[in-house]
Image (spheres, helix red, strand yellow):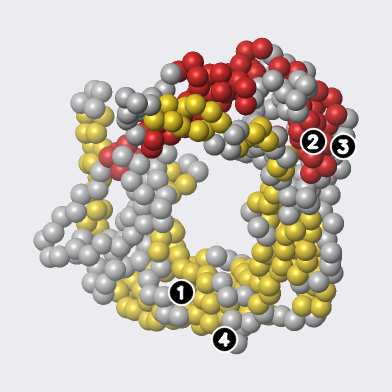
């Protein structure tokens, strides 16, 4: 079937003697059924021309009948015509028509054909009959009987597809005489060297990463590593410094940059490793040059993440020592004394020293260490006297010493929780954090781990 702007072909069907095949083009259109070539009839098509053809040595043995129905007014019309000589294949095409592939790739070629009947009606394309495939240079690209071609070396060659067609001559009186001829078409194929770029998907700020390029086919003579970023406002100097920019393998230090170029982008950005603000996107590129002048450019995305949670911390002071237990005459164990000592903790930095934020985090956490010293802002929390007073208020006792120690452990955990809550409720924790940010915020880079006017902690 042909219509304005396209065509639809159902391909070849075999009919037995006396068999009738019905084709409902309206149903094919409404159900969007693909034809032999994967085409569909657009829903807005309401008219066209139907052509049919026959294969075989005999003619005038089949008729094609078209029945058209106007469902609105209830009128039908029918048209019948016999075929004369079988149709002749007029053209064969090879697909894809031109190919550029990398070494090792598989390309599947296929053929399509057009036909003409003895009324000089042309129809097609649809899948070609059996194609004989040939590569003009199998050392460059091979091809199998099913049309699968493998690129086996760098260079150029031609893939040819041929079919044997039968040409029918109508001498009148229902007599048709055949002759055969070969019909071919070609598709040039160029095989290029294959380049594979190996880039880690993500890295943390400060990590040393390795980029490499591997080649297949051709002889590489030079390498050129570059990078790019998306356009738009950025801060903190986006950069990838390749240690060996002219080698097949190079290393670089992952460097996070800010987008947008603002110290406090969203006052502050959401604290999440997945937040886009903490994930800088680079495109890593390598161009490989080959003998003979061929060039191949490959690229891959590379994400640098700069979120650690937490980046550093100073834990609350530890109460070391022991609780003395005494058994009274009634057989109950109670806490009667202690040898506890309050020990403040050093700063723990959880980001690597290679990160550009390391010194910033160290400066921040170093402020917290002396804040827990006696007489300073947080020096009155997690104290020996405070815990002992709390413990005595509980009047703990147990029939066993082990049972009493279990109660003491629970009491100590509860005391620590109450002290943490008290630091928040009093505002002392917020004051301590603001004091630490006042020291670390001026340190570069200023795009992450900033207070950004925050006043509530945690």
What is the C-alpha distance between the residues marked 2 and 3? Answer: 17 Å
In this view of the protein, which residue sits in the foreground, 445 or 261?
445
Query: Relative to residue 357, is residue 36 depicted above or below?
Result: below
Cα separation, mark 4 vs mark 2, equals: 71 Å
> What percent of the width, then of the height, locates residue 304?
71, 47
Q: In the visual, does 3 lie left or right of 263?
A: left
Q: Position of residue 209 (x, y in %)?
A: 72, 59
Q: Which residue is mark 1?
A: 147
- Where 385 sits versus 287, above or below? above
Which of label 3 and label 4 is nearer to you? 3
- Residue linked to disc 3: 444
Q: Residue at x 73, y 54 (%)?
A: 207
- Assess whether mark 4 and mark 1 are in contact (beta carbons under 8 angstroms): no
CA gap between label 3 and label 4 equals 61 Å
Image coordinates of residue 219 in percent, x first then y, are 75, 81
Q: Earlier in the sequence, mark 3 or mark 4?
A: 4
In which quadrant will I find the C terminus?
top right
* Chain-order first, disc 3 or disc 1: 1
Residue placed most toward the observer, 133 or 138: 138
Q: Return the x and y of residue 71 as percentages of the image width and height.
A: 24, 27
The Cα–Cα distance between marks 1 and 4, rounded to whole angstroms, is 14 Å
- The first of marks 2 and 3 along the sequence is 2
- Badge 4 is on which residue? 138
Secondary structure beneath dot 3 equals loop
Q: Nearer the viewer, mark 2 or mark 3?
A: 2
Say which label, 1 or 4, has the lower sequence index: 4
Q: Residue furthest front?
A: 329
Q: Is residue 400 visible?
A: yes
Question: What secondary structure is found at the residue carrying circle 2?
Answer: helix
Query: Where is mark 2, residue-wise?
Result: 366
């Amino acid at each position: 079937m042909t219509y304005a702007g396209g065509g639809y072909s159902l391909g070849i069907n075999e009919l037995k003697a006396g068999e009738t095949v019905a084709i409902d083009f309206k149903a094919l259109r409404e159900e969007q059924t693909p034809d032999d070539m994967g085409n569909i009839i657009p829903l807005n098509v309401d008219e066209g021309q139907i052509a049919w053809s026959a294969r075989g040595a005999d003619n005038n043995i089949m008729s094609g009948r078209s029945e058209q129905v106007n469902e609105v007014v209830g009128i039908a019309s029918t048209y019948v015509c016999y075929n004369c000589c079988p149709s002749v294949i007029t053209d064969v095409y090879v697909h894809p028509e031109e190919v550029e592939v990398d070494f090792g790739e598989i390309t599947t070629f296929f053929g399509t054909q057009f036909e003409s009947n003895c009324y000089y009606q042309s129809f097609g394309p649809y899948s070609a009959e059996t194609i004989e495939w040939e590569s003009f240079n199998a050392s460059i690209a091979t091809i199998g009987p099913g049309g699968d071609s493998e690129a086996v070396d760098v260079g150029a060659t031609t893939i040819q597809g041929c079919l044997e067609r039968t040409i029918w001559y109508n001498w009148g009186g229902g007599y048709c005489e055949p002759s055969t001829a070969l019909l071919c078409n070609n598709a040039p194929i160029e095989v290029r060297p294959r380049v594979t770029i190996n880039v880690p998907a993500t890295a943390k700020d400060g990590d040393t990463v390795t980029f490499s390029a591997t080649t297949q086919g051709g002889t590489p003579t030079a390498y050129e590593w570059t990078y790019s970023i998306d356009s738009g406002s950025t801060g903190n100097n986006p950069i990838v410094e390749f240690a060996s920019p002219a080698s097949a393998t190079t290393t670089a230090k992952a460097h996070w940059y800010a987008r947008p170029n603002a110290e406090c982008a969203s006052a502050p950005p959401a604290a999440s490793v997945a937040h886009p603000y903490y994930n800088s996107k680079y495109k890593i590129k390598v161009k490989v040059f080959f003998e003979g002048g061929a060039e191949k450019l490959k690229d891959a995305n590379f994400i640098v993440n700069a979120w650690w949670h937490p980046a550093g911390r100073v834990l609350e002071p530890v109460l070391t020592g022991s609780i003395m237990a005494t058994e009274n005459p009634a057989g109950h164990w109670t806490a009667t004394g202690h040898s506890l000592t309050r020990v403040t903790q050093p700063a723990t930095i959880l980001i690597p020293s290679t990160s550009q934020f390391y010194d910033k985090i160290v400066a921040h956490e170093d402020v917290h260490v002396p804040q827990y010293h006696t007489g300073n802002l947080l020096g009155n929390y997690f104290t020996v006297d405070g815990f002992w007073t709390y413990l005595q208020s509980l009047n703990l006792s147990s029939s066993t010493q082990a049972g009493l120690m279990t109660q003491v452990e629970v009491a100590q955990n509860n005391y620590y929780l109450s002290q943490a809550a008290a630091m928040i409720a009093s505002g002392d924790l917020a004051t301590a954090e603001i004091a630490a940010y006042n020291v670390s915020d001026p340190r570069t880079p200023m795009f992450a781990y900033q207070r950004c006017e925050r006043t509530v902690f945690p």
